[in-house]
Image (cartoon, grey):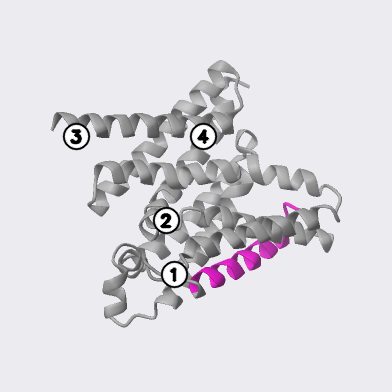
Amino acid sequence: MSGFQLMLPPFVACMVLVAMLSYLGLHVIAREVIFVDLSLAQMAALGSLSALLFHVPADSPRAYIFALVATAIGALLFSLTRTARRGRVPQEAYIGIVYVVASAAAVLVANQVPGGGEAVEKTLVGSLLWVTWPTIWKLAGAYAALGLFQYAFRHRFLTISFHPEQAEQSGWQIRWWDFLFYLSFGVVITLAVPIAGVLMVFSFLVVPAVIANLFAEDKRRLTVISWATGALASIIGLWLSYTKDLPTGPLIVCMYGLLLVLAVGARRLAKQTA
């Protein structure tokens, strides 16, 4: 198998992930819930591990149902604990608590099932290099449907994320819309983690959005910069992984970090020369 044939599926998978995650990352930054994906990912992992207790194969559709149910519980908790920006207890605190408790529960469950340790490790690193075309097409189809859902309710979701005061003044049922947003977000994370792992998913989600916010405020420009940054980091990481024979996932994460450092430097330089 040639290098092109080997790296093409991971490349396409990365582009599909970037298309969805970099956009949702803009919502995450605006809502100031930076670690929500880690928390939802851990809830999904807990659900998948719990499926093993009932002798459900880890990669089966039924295991995904367990993961989605756990993710829905996390989405409900986050919608119920939404707080004002200057509330006494920030929502990030609740998100962290859910992550810690879900992580501890996952360890307990993993100790009770065969292969539990391997399943926990897979949630961290994923299996990007070995992703298959059928998996990519399923992911692309699911993300297309989720993208249409986000587009259909974009006005509500964007207003609640970027202008929560306006949403409150309009009398919207914000907790209900928050639940729908976090539920769709959780489905995105649940599908992404088995392929890319928690570390890569976090990088895909947060780093491009942070870089975009350094250079733009308009939502369209934010989206374009976020997409472009995510694609560039993925391409460089995959190329270096192939040419230097280095682990793909960690290298892509490092490329995201390097681009962020360069972006911060470019932003400061631009301010000094302005």
Residue placed at 30% from the left, 46% from the top? Answer: 213
**Viewer-side residue, 200 vs 16:** 200
Q: Earlier in the sequence, mark 1 or mark 4?
A: 1
| Amino acid type at image mark 1 | Arg
Q: Which residue is located at x 52 percent, y 40 percent?
A: 13
First in residue order: circle 2 vs circle 4: 2
**Relative to 139, is 127 above or below?**
above
Pointers 1 and 4 in contact (C-beta within 8 Å): no
Q: How many residues crowd mark 4 within 10 Å: few (<14), some (14–19), many (20+)?
A: many
Q: Which residue is mark 1?
A: 88
In contact (CB < 8 Å): disc 2 and disc 1 = no
Q: Which residue is mark 3?
A: 271
Q: Along the line of sight, which residue is nearer the eye, 196 or 57?
A: 196
Q: Disc 2 vs disc 4: Cβ atoms closer than 8 Å?
A: no
Q: Which residue is mark 2?
A: 28
Measure the alpha-carbon separation of dots 2 and 1. Answer: 20 Å
Q: Is residue 74 left or right of residue 24?
A: right
* Mark 3: amino acid: Lys
Q: In the figure, 246 relative to 152: above or below? A: above
**Span of residues in magenta:** 57-79
Which sits earlier in the primary sequence, circle 4 or circle 3?
4
